[in-house]
Amino acid sequence: MDELLKIKDEALSQIEEVSTLKELNDLRVFYLGKKGLMQAAMKSMKDMSKDERASFGQVSNKVKQEITQSIEEKKEALEEAEMNAQLLEEDIDITLPSNALPLGSLHPLSVVKNDLEELFLGMGYQVAEGPEVESDHFNFELMNLPQGHPARDMQDTFYIDEKTLMRTHTSPVQAHTLLAAKGKGPIKVICPGKTYRRDDDDATHSHQFMQCEGLVVDKNVTMADLKGTLEVFAKKMFGEKRKIRLRPSYFPFTEPSVEVDISCHNCEGKGCPMCKHTGWIEILGAGMVNPRVLEMCGFDSTVYQGFAFGIGLERVAMLKYGIDNIREFYNDDLRFLNQFTRKG
Ligand code: DAH
């Protein structure tokens, strides 16, 4: 018995002192293994009386249990210490700032285009598209600008060959849309897109620019519908206080045609350099679709009427953001573009 208790005391104090899992395992083998001390002690049982054997067995079981438990506890403590040491060693400082990649932003023309799309989609329009490389037929003929028509001179054209050109306006999309509808209304579309003219670039002219065409065709469409629509456009783009006025004008594809002015948002109509001291800013061309255009594109002009308008996107953006040089849109100068970076 004394021997057992001595083994126990020694085992517990040795277990207490080990510092690695390997040493701990060695101790387990030494005390509890098949050829260990405890097993050896058990062998002496065969020379004992029945009573002695019983109490020896009890004590030795208890000793084994205590040693086992002590080893378990030590094992847990060592494992935890090992894990902590490992975590400490592999520590990553997640507070280090990373190299931030600069975020791009929407081009101001994209902003205006998106705003226009949202506005007109809200009024039930669809967005139509047409080719930028266009035929003379669609760009001019179907827009009631036959060969030799003097208004063709207003639109200096990049020709690709005799019959193919870079579209000079988005109006040919009217013809594509009408023909696709095969004589049946209603039609309500806008078409924002790139357009090209052989202009010399200066502060207000660019050989590449953007327009947004609008076309509504239905029965009983009147000039009042056009005016109401453009009023909504003016207020949504330039503020609720805007008024519009229509001045007679001429476009071959509309009859009657109008030039549309909005009251100056910069001076509230009092007069300033932006509106050339008139209180009004010319913003777009519009009119009732010329019956000849409807007929050429397969619509019965005694049944259907329509209105159309053409908005210059650069002009809208320049007025809205106070940009004084159209070339800014096409120079890709980050100092300019960064001013349109989304906030927040
Ligand atoms: N296509 C014209 C241009 O480029 C703009 C325009 C004026 C379009 C009147 C229209 C319109 O649809 O009705 O100058």
Image: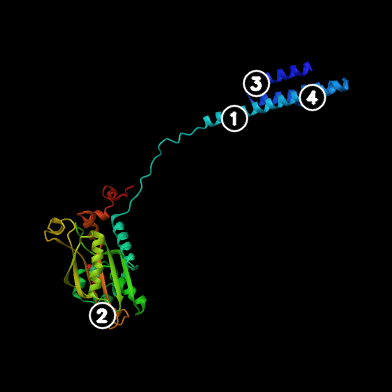
* Disc 3 element: helix
Which residue was labeled with disc 2?
292
Q: Residues within 10 Å of mark 2 (few under 14, many from 20)?
A: some
- Sequence-wise, the earlier of marks 1 and 4 is 4
* Colouring scheme applied when the structure was drawn: rainbow
Quote the CA–CA distance across marks 1 and 2. Answer: 89 Å
- Tag 4–tag 3 contact (CB < 8 Å): no
- Tell me the mark number nearer the camera, choosing from 1 and 2: 1
Residue 310: x and y, percent? 25, 67
Up-down: is 65 above or below 145?
A: above
Q: Is residue 68 left or right of residue 83?
A: right
Quote the CA–CA distance across marks 2 and 3. Answer: 105 Å
Quote the CA–CA distance across marks 4 and 3. Answer: 24 Å
Q: Amino acid at mark 1?
A: Glu
- Tell me the mark number nearer the camera, choosing from 4 and 3: 4
Quote the CA–CA distance across marks 4 and 2. Answer: 116 Å
* Disc 1 element: helix
- Tag 2–tag 3 contact (CB < 8 Å): no
- Sequence-wise, the earlier of marks 4 and 2 is 4
Which residue was labeled with disc 4?
58
Tell me if residue 314 can be seen.
Answer: no
Quote the CA–CA distance across marks 1 and 4. Answer: 33 Å
Tell me if residue 68 can be seen.
Answer: yes
- Tag 1–tag 2 contact (CB < 8 Å): no
- Rendering quadrant holding ligand 1: bottom left
Which residue was labeled with disc 1?
80
Which residue was labeled with disc 3?
16
Residue 212: x and y, percent? 28, 65
Up-down: is 175 above or below 3?
A: below
Residue 296: x and y, percent? 29, 80
